[in-house]
Amino acid sequence: MVLEGKNVVVTGASSGIGLELSKKLLESGCRVIGAARDTKKINFEHENLMLYNCDISQKENVDQLFEYSQKVFGRIDLFIANAGFAYYEKIDQANWAHAKKIFDTNVLSLVYSAEKMKEVNNDKAYNFVAMASGMSYVSLPGYSLYSGTKAAIRGFADAYRWELDKNQYFQVAYPIATRTNFFNYAGNSPVPWPSQEVSKVARIIIKGIKRDKANIYPSKIFLLTKYFNNIVPLIYKIYLKSMCRKFKSFIDKSYN
């Protein structure tokens, strides 16, 4: 995808990866609608940046976001479904509403947004970027709900992209632990290894979008661990067990 002159919607644009992606897209000559639950947190202005307050966990809000974007742009070339959140917790009781809240935001809203992009573009070319996570592959204690939502995105993408027309791309980004406020928001959990600066993560995702890559891995180290799982599974299992023990120890101390 050639980014210059493209119309882009970014959800979760108030901080972290979403904010950094918005800045880099504007630098590339895009027009951007930055959607967030509280756009007042976006301490950034640009002549081609429009802000839109939106809680994307509700269907009607996603519909309104698309209506607004089409009214402003006429056409949406790129949609980046970045909005999402995590709970860091030890699940010790059944709570339907609690689990539903994170799946509505992280999975259902993303899937519905992808369907909307197909609906409004029909057979025209477009790109859709789904923000998954390294935890799609490496689930960690304390993040069982979050890991489940991100694994669901990966499963949906692997099949759904085959249903799209030519020049329609469903791209999935798998950032690892990114040095933002994510882990503070999640509950002051330990930061997994390895981790990356947000500017580097955004830069590599932008590069992947330009190349229409199906899967975008900002961390080469993480990508190597995936290969190790296929080639030398024992080493991968040792790494995974080490990470899980670390997080289990932390969560046991936090909730006892």
Image: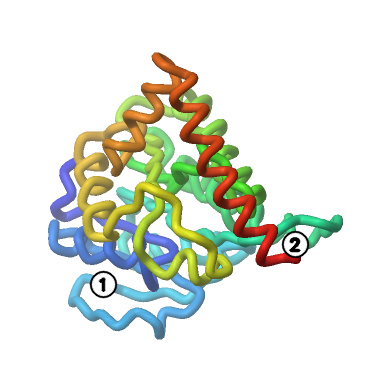
Q: Which residue is mark 1?
A: 49
> Which label number is shown at residue 175?
none
In the rendered view, does 85 fall on the left or right side of 17? Answer: right
Residue 218: quadrant of the picture? top left
What is the C-alpha distance between the residues marked 2 and 1? Answer: 34 Å
Q: Which residue is mark 2?
A: 98
Q: Residue at x 38, y 52 (%)?
A: 80
Expressed as whole percent of the image width and height from the top left, the position of residue 33 reads 34, 67
Count of marks placed on residues: 2
Looking at the image, is mark 2 or mark 1 nearer the viewer? Answer: 2
Pinpoint residue 7: horizontal percent, then vertical percent.
27, 57
Q: Quadrant of the C terminus?
A: bottom right
Answer yes or no: is residue 124 visible: no
- Name the foreground residue: 254 vs 149: 254
**Can residue 65 be spotted in the picture?**
yes
Q: Residues within 10 Å of mark 1 (few under 14, many from 20)?
A: some
Amino acid type at circle 1 is Leu
Check disc 1 and report its element: helix, strand or loop.
strand
Query: Which residue corresponds to the image point at 45% horizontal and 58% vertical from the top-left?
Result: 191
Q: Is residue 200 left or right of residue 157?
A: left
Secondary element type, mark 2: helix
Identify which residue, 220 or 255, lies in the foreground: 255
What amino acid does circle 2 point to?
Answer: His
**Do the CB atoms of the residues marked 2 and 1 lie less than 8 Å apart?**
no
Query: Dividing the image into 4 quarters, which one contains the N terminus?
Result: top left
* Residue 124 point in image, percent of width and height: 34, 37
Is residue 117 positioned above or below 95 on the image?
Answer: above
